[in-house]
Image (cartoon, rainbow, N blue to C red):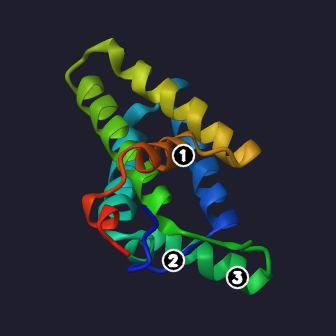
């Protein structure tokens, strides 16, 4: 379901954010998992409140727009869904780590893989799943339209 009630996002800004997520996950796996809650907060803000309420997104979007490399505009609905998954996975990883359970690496590795696919190949697995879901199960209000 496309979201037209929120501003679209720039493709290259979203790819930069995916690169930052990849970097945070790599650093966490190399021994500094204290950064995982930062990813959870970014996912919370961008996923539930919108990209344009996230300070880091606004900073990157302003800088990249000024430099002329922000990229084309994309609908933010699927990207918000991806950030909700980021919030869940980073929160689970954080809780597991702070509880002393070594399984925190599992969601961290999943985030590393999927965020790497986004920034390197512009393939958003969560966006694909989002689109597939709404093709298979469209919202009821669109079934009666027209």
Q: Which tag, 3 or 2, sits closer to the chain's start?
A: 2
Position of residue 33 in the picture relative to residue 57 (left or right): left
Q: Residue at the spot x=42%, y=59% of the render? A: 80
Q: Is residue 64 above or below residue 107?
A: below
Quadrant containing the C terminus is: bottom left
Residue positioned most to the bottom: 66
Pointer 1: residues within 10 angstroms few (<14), some, or many (20+)? Answer: many
How far across and down, in percent of the image, does residue 121 sit? Answer: 75, 43
Pointer 2: residues within 10 angstroms few (<14), some, or many (20+)? Answer: some
Pointer 3: residues within 10 angstroms few (<14), some, or many (20+)? Answer: some
How far across and down, in percent of the image, does residue 82 sit? Answer: 45, 49
Q: Give me the C-alpha separation between circle 1 and circle 2.
A: 16 Å
Q: Secondary structure at mark 2?
A: helix
Q: Secondary structure at mark 3?
A: helix
Quadrant housing residue 96: top left
Q: Residue at the spot x=72%, y=73% of the render? A: 72
Q: Residue at the spot x=42%, y=71% of the render? A: 3
Quadrant housing residue 42: bottom left
From the image, tell me which residue sits under label 3.
Answer: 65
Q: Give me the C-alpha separation between circle 1 and circle 3.
A: 21 Å
Residue positioned most to the front: 146
Position of residue 63 in the picture relative to residue 93 (left or right): right
Position of residue 17 in the picture relative to residue 55 (left or right): right
Residue 119 can be seen, yes or no = yes
From the image, tell me which residue sits under label 1.
Answer: 21
Q: Mark number for residue 35?
A: none
Q: Residue at the spot x=67%, y=65% of the render? A: 11
Does the residue at mark 1 contact the one at mark 2 (Cβ under 8 Å)? no
From the image, tell me which residue sits under label 2.
Answer: 58
């Amino acid at each position: 379901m496309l979201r037209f009630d929120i501003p679209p996002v720039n493709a290259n800004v979203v790819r930069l954010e995916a690169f930052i997520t990849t970097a945070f996950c790599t650093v966490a796996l190399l021994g500094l998992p204290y950064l995982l809650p930062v990813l959870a907060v970014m996912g919370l803000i961008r996923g539930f409140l919108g990209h344009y309420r996230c300070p880091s997104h606004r900073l990157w979007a302003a800088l990249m727009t000024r430099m002329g490399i922000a990229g084309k505009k994309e609908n933010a609905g699927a990207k918000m869904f991806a950030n909700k998954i980021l919030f869940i996975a980073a929160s689970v990883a954080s809780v597991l780590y702070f509880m002393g359970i070594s399984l925190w690496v599992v969601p961290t590795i999943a985030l590393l893989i999927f965020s790497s696919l986004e920034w390197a190949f512009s393939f958003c697995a969560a966006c694909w799943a989002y689109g597939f879901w709404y093709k298979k199960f469209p919202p009821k209000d669109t079934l009666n339209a027209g």
